[in-house]
């Protein structure tokens, strides 16, 4: 199910995607192309999950992002790639900075192993739009020895509308806009909890 349905951009700064300050964003890897070169759209991901009950969906968005935009119902694992620092508002950038989840690899490995995922099982990694977080997260999982790790190219929210009254709103493609099952209710068994 290799797919190259949309051209993969070169490195896109997480600063643009998440509004972080350059000093913080420079510390977080952000890119669209994965080492395995496996990509799916939200619809292809859903089809893959319907065809293969061993397929696993991993959401790597910040928990508060999920709270306000929704959650794909078949999500198996939720571990954020980056986390907003809610205690450190950046007045110059007019937003909260984001930092890499220092425990991402450890946490996602524990969740994958707890589900009994085999090295050959399809793993689909989803972020907001497929722009900066799913690819580096997919690469970390591939480095663990999993050989069928896909980056979802349109993510949960999809692309921004380019024209009309809702220009700039993420309402094109993506899991939520493709009529796939989602909810504002978050499965407590899947919800990420920070390490204490």
Image (cartoon, rainbow, N blue to C red):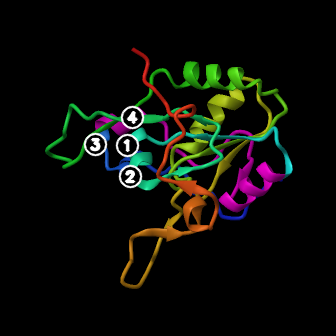
Residue drawn at point x = 19 percent, y = 39 percent: 89
Tags 2 and 1 in contact by the CB under 8 Å rule?
Answer: yes
Query: Real-space Cα distance between discs 1 and 4?
Result: 9 Å
Q: CA distance from mark 2 to mark 3?
A: 22 Å
Relative side of 168 to 7, left or right = left
Residue 66 can be seen in this image: yes
Magenta span: 23-50
Q: Earlier in the sequence, mark 1 or mark 4?
A: 1
Callout 1: SS: helix
Residue 166 location in percent, x, y?
A: 38, 78
Q: Which residue is located at x 49 percent, y 35 percent?
A: 81
- Which residue position holds label 3? 21
Front-lying residue, 135 or 188: 188
Residue 36 vs residue 113, the one in the foreground: 113
Residue 64 disc label:
1
Q: Which residue is mark 4?
A: 83
Considering only vertical position in the picture, is 8 above or below 58? Answer: below
Going from the N terminus, do you reach mark 4 or mark 3 first? 3
Q: Residue 163, located in which quarter of the rendered image?
A: bottom left
Q: Is residue 130 left or right of residue 69?
A: right
Counting from the top left corner in percent of width and height, residue 33 is at 63, 47
Residue at image location 62% in from the left, 67% down from the top? 179
């Amino acid at each position: 199910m290799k797919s190259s349905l949309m051209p993969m951009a070169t490195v896109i700064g997480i600063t643009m995607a998440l509004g972080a300050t350059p000093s913080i964003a420079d510390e977080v890897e952000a890119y669209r192309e994965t080492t395995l070169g496996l990509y799916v759209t939200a619809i292809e991901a859903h089809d893959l999950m319907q065809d293969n009950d061993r397929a696993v969906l991993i959401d790597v968005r910040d928990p508060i992002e999920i709270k306000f935009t929704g959650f794909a119902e078949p999500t198996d694992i939720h571990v954020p790639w980056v986390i907003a620092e809610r205690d450190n508002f950046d007045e110059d950038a007019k937003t909260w900075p984001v930092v890499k989840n220092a425990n991402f690899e450890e946490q996602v490995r524990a969740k994958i192993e707890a589900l009994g995922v085999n090295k050959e099982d399809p793993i689909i990694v989803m972020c907001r739009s497929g722009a900066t977080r799913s690819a580096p997260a997919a690469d970390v999982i591939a480095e663990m020895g999993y050989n069928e790790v896909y980056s979802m190219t349109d993510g949960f929210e999809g692309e921004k509308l380019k024209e009309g009254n809702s220009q700039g709103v993420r309402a094109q493609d993506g899991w939520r806009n493709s009529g796939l099952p989602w909810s504002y209710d978050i499965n407590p068994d899947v919800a990420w909890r920070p390490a204490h």
